[in-house]
């Protein structure tokens, strides 16, 4: 009998998304997930999370604080051990990455 437990990445992914939806870009009344700022979320067997995200612009006023907020809030999920947030501008963020909900919220539809 194996005592290894396979992690439920779907369930964990949903928890991470739920947390990401509580983080807002201070200049836009839409959360970072709906804005399309989160490009990818990786979780390994050790419950280490890596989040690949972008900012609306390279000189975004929250460039220093937003990734830290993402890291700290995701790290607060019980089973998660470590979180690394990597910022990328490739591909650069554009309004096309926003969810329909976000576009609606901002009057872009």
Image: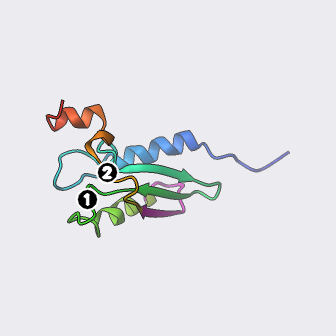
Residue nearest the observer in this picture, 4 or 97: 97
Taking the image as shown, residue 43 lies to the left or right of residue 29, namely right
Q: Residues within 10 Å of mark 2 (few under 14, many from 20)?
A: many
Q: Residue at x 75, y 50 (%)?
A: 4
Taking the image as shown, residue 101 lies to the left or right of residue 3, namely left
- SS class, disc 1: loop
The percent position of residue 5, horizontal first and vertical second, equals: 70, 48
Q: Residues within 10 Å of mark 1 (few under 14, many from 20)?
A: few
The residue furthest right is 1
85 is within the stretch colored magenta: yes
- In the figure, residue 79 lies in which quadrant? bottom right
Mark 2 in CB contact with mark 1 (< 8 angstroms): yes
Residue nearest the observer in this picture, 15 or 93: 93
Q: Which residue bears the numbered disc 1?
A: 57
The percent position of residue 102, horizontal first and vertical second, equals: 24, 37
Q: Residue at x 34, y 50 (%)?
A: 37
Counting residues from the start of the chain, the first of labels 2 and 1 encountered is 1
The residue furthest left is 107
The quadrant of the image that shows the N terminus is: top right
**Region rendered in magenta:** 76-86
């Amino acid at each position: 009998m194996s005592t290894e437990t396979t992690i439920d990445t779907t369930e964990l992914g949903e928890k991470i998304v739920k947390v990401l939806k509580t983080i807002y870009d201070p200049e836009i009344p839409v959360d970072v997930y709906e804005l399309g700022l989160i490009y990818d979320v990786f979780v390994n067997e050790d419950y280490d999370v890596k989040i690949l995200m972008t900012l609306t612009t390279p000189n975004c006023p929250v460039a220093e604080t937003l990734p830290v907020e993402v890291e700290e809030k995701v790290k607060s999920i019980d089973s998660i051990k470590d979180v690394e947030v990597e910022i990328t501008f490739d591909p650069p963020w554009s309004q096309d990455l926003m969810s329909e909900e976000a576009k609606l919220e901002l009057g872009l539809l």
